[in-house]
Every structure is written in C-alpha cells, then in structure tokens.
Image: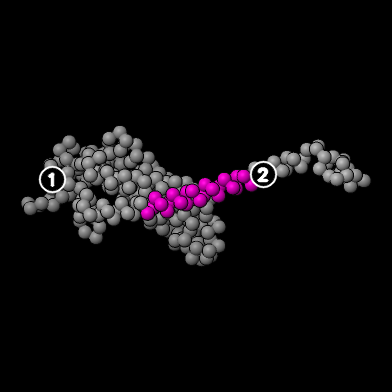
Amino acid sequence: MSTLHLVSRDDGYLECSSQNATDYYGLGVRLGIYFAWLTGWVANTILPSEFTGASNTNTIFVLTLLIAMANDARIGVLSQIDGLVLMHLCGGTVFGILSLWGYRTRLYHDQGPKAVSQFGGFGTHIKLFVCLGVAMFGLWFWIYGVTGTLKPMGVDDGNPPECATLYTFFFAKIRADGGIRIYYIIVCAVCIAYFGIMVLASTIGAWFTFDRILGFVEFKGWATTNRQKYATGFKQKEYVLTIEL
C-alpha cells in the first residue's frame, strides 16, 4: 500500500493511501510519463524533426493508461482517487503534448500552414481514437465515477473515514464531486464532439482514398488484359506491336 495524498484536519494532516497506486501511477510510471512529456517538449523546441517519435511515445503511454482505466473500471477494481489521478495524467498528455495537425508545434511556426501536410498519417488517426477514448471515459468518470460508481478510498483500504472525500486541485483545493464536475463534463463533451467529428472526417477521407486506390488498381489491371480497347480492333499487345513496327 503506497501513500497517495494527505487530507487536512484540525489536529494536523491525515495520511491516506491507495492499494493500487503503485500499479497505476507509482513513481516509476509517473517518471516515465513526465520524461515522455519532457522529451516531447525538447523535441518540439530544439529538434522538431524528432517530434513525431516523441508524440508517438506519449500516445503509447496514454493508450496504456486508457486501457487500464477502462478495464479496471469494468471489473470494479478502479477507485475514485485512482481514476482522478489517471485522468489528470491523460489530460496532461492530450492537452499538453499531443498535436493532431501540428498547429501547436514548431514545425507549424517555422513552415506555416504547409506543416500540416506532415501530419494526418496513420499515427494521427491512432491519436484521434486515443483522444476520443480519453474524452469518453472522462465524461463517464465525471458523471458517474465521482458520484458513487467507483468506490471511494476509505476503510476498505485501511484508511480513516475522512479519506473517502475526493478532492482535486483547480487553482485551489476543491471537492471533486462539487461544481467542478460541471466544468469537466462540459470539457469532455466538447472534446467528444471535436474528436468525434475528426474521426468521422478522417474515416470518410480514408474511404475515398482507398476507393481511388482500388479504382486505380482495377484500371491498371484492365489495361493489361487482352480485351479489345482500341477503335482499330487490335488487342493491346497487337496494338503495341503494330506501333513498334
């Protein structure tokens, strides 16, 4: 059991702990995420050509956290405080490091709108789905997770009853089940709408691209057959032979 947070009370500070903290966001996990953030910032600032690789690394971390949150919430292992910390870590990556179209990168600053052409590949589509998944889980967490669906940190973890109250920080220490929920619900809903539209648009674009490629392949295959295609009545091989002669 690892120490997680401290709750203030009249006679000092109350130590609270979570049994799953080490598995979800222990020191090693958090250091990995923080160094991935730092790598992304350094790449964007000094080596913009390496930003794509740093962004992919951060995407892998977010995807891992998302899978852990969704699976453990499904089986009832995830607690409120675990979900809160993991949501902050995911949000820090989505809003701090990842850039889908490159608008917040040095590449866009140096090259202007032309830099957008360097994004939009397979990795960007993966980022879109990951960001959409984080937003969807965040909406569920702030609507249901902090209101009782996820278990509070309390006596079951060997903590005093006071530890059951969930707090977060938003320029001040506030209750997570208070008015701040409305703000996060709105943010998550807006993110779902935005990333959902981007996923839909990218899917339609990918379909048209695939359709053009398929049409090109079919046309090329048709052009190499022995069917008649010329007004002369010659087959393709006969026509080429006649031209050469």
SS state under label 2: helix
Place of residue 171 in the rendered image (x, y in percent of width and height, measured from the top left)? 24, 60
Residue type pointed to by label 1: Glu
**In this view of the protein, can residue 122 be seen by the observer?**
no
Reading the chain from its start, which is encountered first: label 2 or label 1?
Answer: 1
| Residue ID at (54%, 56%) | 118
Q: Nearer the viewer, residue 110 or 199?
A: 199
Query: Which portion, as a residue range, is magenta?
Result: 190-213
- Which secondary structure class fits the magenta region best? helix
Q: Nearer the viewer, residue 122 or 51?
A: 122
Give the residue furthest to the left. 11
Q: Is residue 114 magenta?
A: no
Checking the image for residue 176, the label placed there is none
Q: Is residue 194 magenta?
A: yes
- Would you name the residue on which mark 1 appears? 162
- Would you name the residue on which mark 2 appears? 215
| Residue ID at (44%, 61%) | 104
